[in-house]
Image (cartoon, rainbow, N blue to C red):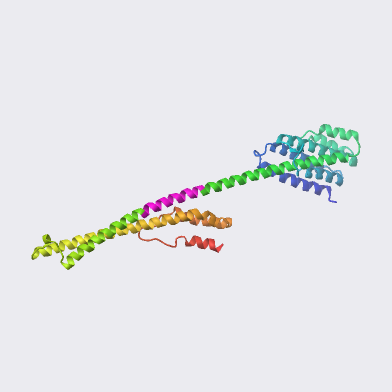
Amino acid sequence: MQDAKEVLAQLREEIWGLRRSVSRLDGEIPEADVLLRVMDSVDDVINVIAASDAEVSPEAIESFVATVDASLTRPAFNGGKMLDAARQGQVLRQGLRSAISALVYSLDLTRGRDLANDLLQRRTRIDVAEEVEALIDRERARNEDVHIETAGILREVRALSAATQTQAEEARSANTEAQRAAGKIGAGSLAAAFSQYAQEHLRTANRFRNATIALLSISAIAALVLVLGVEPDWTVREGREQWEQAAYRLALIAALVGLAGYLGRQAGNHRRLGEWGHSISIQLRNFGSFIERLDNETRHEAYLSFARRVLGASPDASRVDPTAAQPLVDLIAKR
């Protein structure tokens, strides 16, 4: 059997662990203040016993520890229905009063009244004075039925605390899921914006391409007319005037070709931007599902890399890296 001091130390560790858990949930549990006061009361009892120089019956300590420990396993029911938070708090106070009273009485039987009176004078944060005085005056054997009933009540109280913590965790989980859903909606909106951006640039690229084809066709026809000498009657000239007319036509053809080249470059620029926007749109729609099963560290690095790609500068007119997404793919593949 363990030493009484060791048993008390173990009980104190458990009480303070539970107290920290309830403190973190303060504001989310209606009866959190009641739970904290009750646990402070148990701590008061432990302090009084631990500070006493007298020998304490290990059986009495273990009986008290068992009733307190059992208090944290099952919610209280009445007629098959779980009691509400306020009623659970009342059950908790009543159960702990009975547990402390039983401890004081057992100490009174094993060592006399000194330690029991010390407990009474300390008057812990729940009112146990009447129960303690009655037990000291009676000096009778413990009622096992009372112990069984007390243990059941305290088990129910602990279950209430556990159920409340579970509900708080479920609320946090629901909040996380809501944030995740909001992220998916945001990614979908951004993907739609990039898709529209891509369509606009691709339409503009097609217009520039059509204009380029038209100008090149006109330039080719004009060049054939000049080279083959096929020309309308009004263009026929003699001598110097004929050479001047030829130079004028060559300059006109060169201008048309130059304009066609400019329009072709613009078509290429807009097409690259359109393809880039289309690629980003597809990646935004599938990125979340692609990295969902990765560990947190890898997912964080992947998000950073993808954010640089999406939020960075668009590809310039002269240079586009077709493998811009490859480092991201390599990072995920390594994991």
Name the residue nearer the viewer: 132 or 290.
290
Residue plotted at (53% across, 54% down): 288
Question: How many numbered callouts?
Answer: 0
Residue 158 figure quarter: top right
Where is residue 209? Give x, y as percent.
31, 58
Where is residue 67? Give x, y as percent.
81, 43
Residue 323: say if magenta: no
Name the residue nearer the viewer: 224 or 40.
224
Name the residue furthest bottom: 228
Residue 229 figure quarter: bottom left
Q: Which quadrant: the C terminus?
A: bottom right
Above or below residue 224? Residue 21 is above
Can residue 47 be spotted in the picture? no
Prevailing SS of the magenta stretch: helix
Residue plotted at (71% across, 34% down): 86
Residue 192: say if magenta: yes
Name the residue nearer the viewer: 262 or 58.
262
Residue range of the region highlighted in magenta in the rendering: 185-202
Can residue 28 be spotted in the picture? yes
Name the residue furthest top: 130
Residue plotted at (28% across, 59% down): 212
- On the picture, is 259 further left or further right than 80? left
- On the picture, is 189 further left or further right than 84? left
Where is residue 307? Give x, y as percent.
48, 54
Where is residue 172? Give x, y as percent.
62, 45
